[in-house]
Amino acid sequence: MTGIPLIIAFVVAIVLMILAISKLKIHPFLSILGISLLFALVAGIPLADIPSTIGAGFSGTFKSIGIVIIFGVLVGTLLEKTGAALKMADCVVKAVGKKHPELAIMLMGWIVSIPVFCDSGFVVLNPIRKAMVKRTGVSSVTMTVALSLGLYISHCFIPPTPGPIAAASSLGIGDYLLTVMGLGALISIPALIAAYFFSRAIGKKVKAADDIENDDTVQTYEELVASYGKLPSGWLAFSPIVVPILLMALASAFSMAGLNVGIITFLGTPIIALAVGVIFGIIGLAKAGKMKLFYEITNETLKVVGPILFITAAGGVLGKVIATSSMVTYITDNSNVLSAVGIFFPFLLAAILKSAQGSSTVAITTTAGILAPMLPALGLGTPALAALTVIAIGAGAMTVSHANDSYFWVVTNFGELTPEDGYKTQTLGTLIIGLASMVGVLIMYFILK
């Protein structure tokens, strides 16, 4: 099967998957794998190739983010057990103000995700989110959505995140990364505003598991502090998060400058950088006199990570099946049909690819590769407009995050949301910020044109 019938089959498959998870209450792991197998059969992938396609999608996900998630969760657990997360939450609330914790966590996510993948960023910052929920009494859903969308915006817009860098290079503006960064930061403003108001509104309508559990048992800040004993210093509290971010940012800066320093590249690799964060977390655990808990903490971490990794890997299988089918090729071959819509074309194409296969980075890089020879014909041939095209692609690549996106499962699992509530929060939220971003892109288009 190919062409329009395959597109229709894909839409039907996504609907069936959502129904299986939310209505029939089939575990997401089995639902996604089942739909992946059915879609592979309908798409006409040779029977002999289906097992290897499923295996490649499953193992590829583990290879790309598996260890990163494990280390990130371990860092988070260490921060929780030592009281470091509570200390960080207190510092952030004091800096921004007690009345705006959702703004604090959103901006923190936006900054962190510039050098760090949003999946890893959410895992690392989740303990701070949970501590701030207890510290301020704000809805857990509000804080989850604010953090998630703050991370997602810079992940899709601002180098040195890999997607925007690759897109800029494909579009021939590798020497104009500062322009891309500036436009990305500027277009982030309407997206962040939309994210802020949406997170506050949705938190009044949706409840997470920890919202329900803590309705009558929220501890005061003083009680929390007393339960941890003496809190660590601000520097020691932030170091398991800040040091890995600095290492990754330094490696990205060296790479952007064309400098190849082996030790910097090594330390800036996400796996190694987060391993360094784990070491700083262990130092904090030792200073708190709780090293005897380290084995238990590690064991607890692996129990928490297991379900997330397997569901995430199942999403990777669906993405691989779609990429192996002829659907992406069909979209690429018929891209001229969409080109008449101008600056909206990059957004629409990236949104189709994002929704189809799940990865924002893949959607960004694929869309940029398709558009590269077409920029002059689209009237986007100047460096400034090409840089704006990168941002339009990024806006499309965040529209929308649903069940075939690993980030969807990271947010719903760590935010203690059901998949059905994930569609109401994460999926709807990414649609809103994607559209808000495109409004900003359109305004800038008329200014730069």
Image (cartoon, helix red, strand yellow):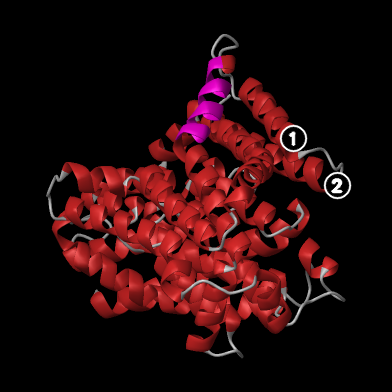
Residue 118's place in the image compared with 444, above or below, is above
Rounded to the nearest angstrom, the CA distance separating label 2 from label 1 is 11 Å
> What residue span does the magenta drawing correspond to?
52-63
Q: Could you tell me the amino acid type at mark 1?
A: Ser
Q: Is mark 1 on a helix, strand or loop?
A: helix
Residue 23 percent location from the top left of the image: 86, 47
Residue most toward the top? 48
Neighbour tally class for label 1: few under 14, some 14-19, many 20 plus, Cα within 10 Å:
many
Residue 90 lies in what quarter of the image? bottom right
From where the camera sits, is residue 208 visible?
Answer: no
Q: Which of marks 2 and 1 is nearer the N terminus?
A: 2
In this rendering, does residue 269 appear at all?
A: yes
**Residue in the image at 77% along x and 54% along y:** 418
**Residue hosting label 2:** 23
Q: Identify which residue is drawn at 13% across, 55% down.
A: 257
Task: Decide whether the magenta segment is chiefly helix, strand or loop.
Answer: helix
* Residue underneath mark 1: 31
Q: In which quarter of the image is residue 135?
A: bottom right
